[in-house]
């Protein structure tokens, strides 16, 4: 490229432009909203059954916003209830349950993706270049990688022995356990 083009590209690069701060606007609650929140908190303060239902829903993995909608309440009331030990425990159990469910959905999606790659790599009607790419992706994902020898230009295959354990950690979103 010529120096003129490079200079022009540098001038219009987003990195060379100063950042502009966008003003944020906070909308203060209106008096009727505040009064409504206070009335609702007082109204539901003695409803043990509703609090117990909220805790059960939180433990089942629902978020505070969803529980509030299901119980026809304001989220602010539930946030106040969430300060109790029982509610905090329920929210933690619910968070773990959601993480487990998402992990299972990711495992299913991974299985579908692998099946698709296998189908593409085995389909004679698919362009050979795409079949090779799908095959390379399969090898890459299963822990097998091409390792080129420096001088000879030969290719060796390295196998990741701990692939299943690594995949389980990735899906579960956990950190590796210390040995």
Image: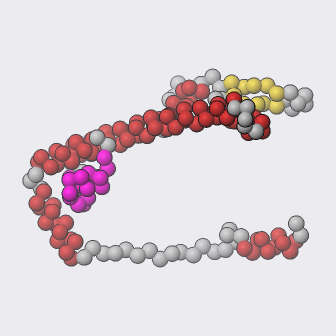
Could you say where residue 99 lies in the image, as x and y percent from the top left? 41, 40
Residue at 30% x, 55% y is 65
Query: Residue 147, located in which quarter of the rendered image?
Result: top right
Observer-nearest of 83 and 146: 146
Say whether residue 64 is magenta: yes
**Mostly what secondary structure, the magenta segment?**
helix
Residue at 11% x, 61% y is 42
Observer-nearest of 35 and 16: 35
Visible residue check, residue 63: yes
User: Residue pushed farthest front?
Assistant: 125
Say whether residue 157 is magenta: no
The boundaries of the magenta stretch are 62-81
Query: Residue 124, located in which quarter of the rendered image?
Result: top right
Q: Is residue 25 left or right of residue 110?
A: left
User: Quadrant location of the N terminus?
Assistant: bottom right
Residue at 82% x, 31% y is 148
Observer-nearest of 120 and 109: 120
């Amino acid at each position: 490229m010529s120096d003129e083009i490079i200079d022009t590209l540098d001038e219009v690069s987003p990195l060379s432009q100063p950042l502009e701060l966008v003003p944020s606007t906070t909308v203060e609650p209106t008096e009727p909203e505040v009064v409504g929140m206070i009335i609702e908190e007082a109204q539901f303060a003695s409803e043990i059954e509703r609090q117990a239902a909220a805790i059960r829903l939180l433990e089942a993995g629902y978020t505070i916003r969803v529980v509030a909608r299901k119980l026809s309440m304001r989220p602010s009331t539930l946030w106040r209830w969430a300060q109790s030990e029982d509610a905090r425990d329920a929210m933690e159990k619910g968070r773990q349950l959601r993480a487990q469910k998402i992990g299972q959905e990711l495992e299913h999606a991974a299985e579908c993706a692998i099946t698709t790659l296998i189908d593409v790599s085995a389909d004679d009607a698919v362009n050979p270049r795409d079949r090779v790419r799908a095959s390379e992706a399969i090898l890459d994902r299963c822990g097998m990688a091409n390792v080129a020898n420096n001088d000879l230009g030969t290719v060796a295959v390295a196998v990741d022995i701990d692939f299943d354990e690594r995949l389980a950690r990735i899906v579960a979103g956990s950190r590796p356990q210390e040995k």
